[in-house]
Image: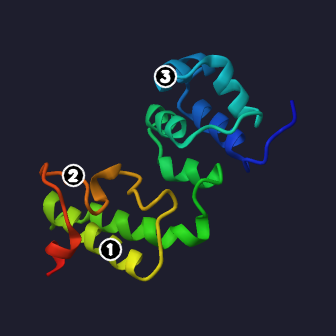
Amino acid sequence: MASLNVGNLGEYLREQRRNAQLSLRQLADAAGVSNPYLSQIERGLRKPSAEVLQQVAKALRISAETLYVRAGILDAERDRDDVETRAVVLADPTLTEQQKQVLLQIYESFRKENGFVGGDGAVDLQRGADAVPGTRTAGGTDADPQQTAG
């Protein structure tokens, strides 16, 4: 089987797995994927989905965004500012969770208005659909950035 062009994702995963002192089987179990499938990913023979990368990142306790960039799912240059902006908002200890979500919704609505869409359809990668306008917020209500912004 020929190697796919997935950057250095496999090498990076292997390095992270070894740093975490996990065997291939232990990581596969923790991520909920098969041992042979994870082995093929590490060897560059398979390109995993965003969902699989998210499971692996969670099992390794590393950033899913890093894996998305290495797998070519996110464009590192184009999306770096967006990811960094979201990370700063989410890390701000002076804001409540609701305020963070509203701020991210307004930010996303302005990006859409200006013709920019996130790497996977504007879904905030750390929060799932919570940060996307028109979806559920952390408080459990439907959010409309137009109403929130006005």
Residue under label 2, please give it: 136
Q: Residue shown at 61%/31% (left/top)? A: 18
Q: In which quarter of the image is residue 58?
A: top left
Which of 138/23 is in front?
Answer: 138
| Residue 32: assigned label | 3
Residue under label 1, please give it: 109
The CA distance from mark 1 to mark 3 is 35 Å
Instruction: Name the amino acid, label 3.
Output: Gly
Tell me if label 2 and label 1 are in contact, CB under 8 Å: no
Q: In which quarter of the image is the N terminus?
A: top right
Give the SS element for disc 3: loop
First in residue order: circle 2 vs circle 3: 3
Q: Quadrant of residue 40?
A: top right
| Residue 61: assigned label | none
Up-down relation of residue 115 to residue 139 (above or below): below
Q: Residue shown at 28%/67% (left/top)? A: 104
Q: How many tags in the picture?
A: 3
Q: Position of residue 87 (x, y in %)?
A: 36, 63
User: In the visual, does 117 lie left or right of 47?
Assistant: left
Up-down relation of residue 114 to residue 127 (above or below): below
First in residue order: circle 1 vs circle 3: 3
Q: Residue shown at 46%/59% (left/top)? A: 121
Instruction: Name the amino acid, label 1.
Output: Ser
Q: Where is residue 8 in the image (x, y as percent from the top left)?
A: 72, 47
Q: Quadrant of residue 53?
A: top right
Q: Position of residue 82 (x, y in %)?
A: 44, 70
The CA distance from mark 2 to mark 3 is 27 Å
Which of 48/26 is in front?
Answer: 48
